Amino acid sequence: MKNIKWILFDVSGVIVHFTFQNPEGYTVGTRFFDQKQLEGIVYTKEYDNYILGLISHEQWVGKYLKNHHLDLSIAEFDELMKKDIPPMEGMESLIQKLEKKYKICIATNEGKMVTKYKIEGSGILPYLSKVIPSYLLRETKPSPHFFKKMLKIIGATADECVFVDDKQENINGARSLGIQSILFKDTKQLEEEFVRLQIL
């Protein structure tokens, strides 16, 4: 594809797997925590406020731990999360290839600390030109406002970008602004799509 300058990636479900997916649960010292207990933290109103930058990481995690009577400190929860960010198979080498020709940007619905943990856990930090998390924009995908602000930050037009996400509604949001978008299924499918579009 001509004119493409930027490849924009979602993080969870694309660059890394979702956290807290181990059905065997998690252990801190002698304390055991069920997978569902921990995963539930992202299905709360507080999480929605966290990714919009309206509350802090400590407020989000602290309230969840207290409300669910989980015997964990915020620091212990963070350590559990950092150890449970499996990179998506093959993504680092794919991004390495792309970075030789294009600028790579992360465009994610996430709060400050979780953005940091996931990018550090992914191994792709050296290849990134820009990281655009929702908490800084005070907007979330699939809102067109998220994508408009994103384009302004990277100084690009819609036709200079390709966006990759694992959620159809986010793909639709990007396409509404004319951004070429790919629904992610796995790394092999994504690489084939890049070849088809003459990006690779």
Image (cartoon, helix red, strand yellow):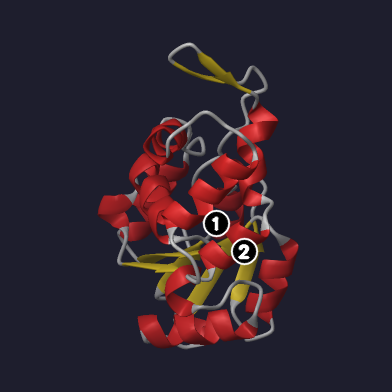
Q: Which residue is mark 1?
A: 195
From the viewer's perspective, is 164 left or right of 172? left
Q: Where is residue 15 drawn, in percent x and y? A: 49, 48
Q: Identify residue for label 2.
A: 48
Query: Is 103 above or below relative to 39?
Result: below
- Residue 1 seen in this snapshot: no
Residue 29 % position (x, y): 43, 14
**Badge 2 local density, few (<14 within 10 Å), some, or many (20+)?**
some
Check whether the beta carbons of the residues at disc 1 and disc 2 lie within 8 A of each other: no
What type is the residue that disc 2 sits on?
Asp
User: Residue 96, percent across and down?
Assistant: 34, 49
Q: State the CA–CA distance, disc 1 to disc 2.
A: 36 Å
Residue occupying the point 45% across, 31% down: 80
Q: Is residue 44 left or right of residue 118?
A: right
In the displayed structure, would residue 71 be above or below residue 137? above
Q: Position of residue 8 (x, y in %)?
A: 48, 66
Which numbered disc flags the more N-terminal residue, 1 or 2?
2
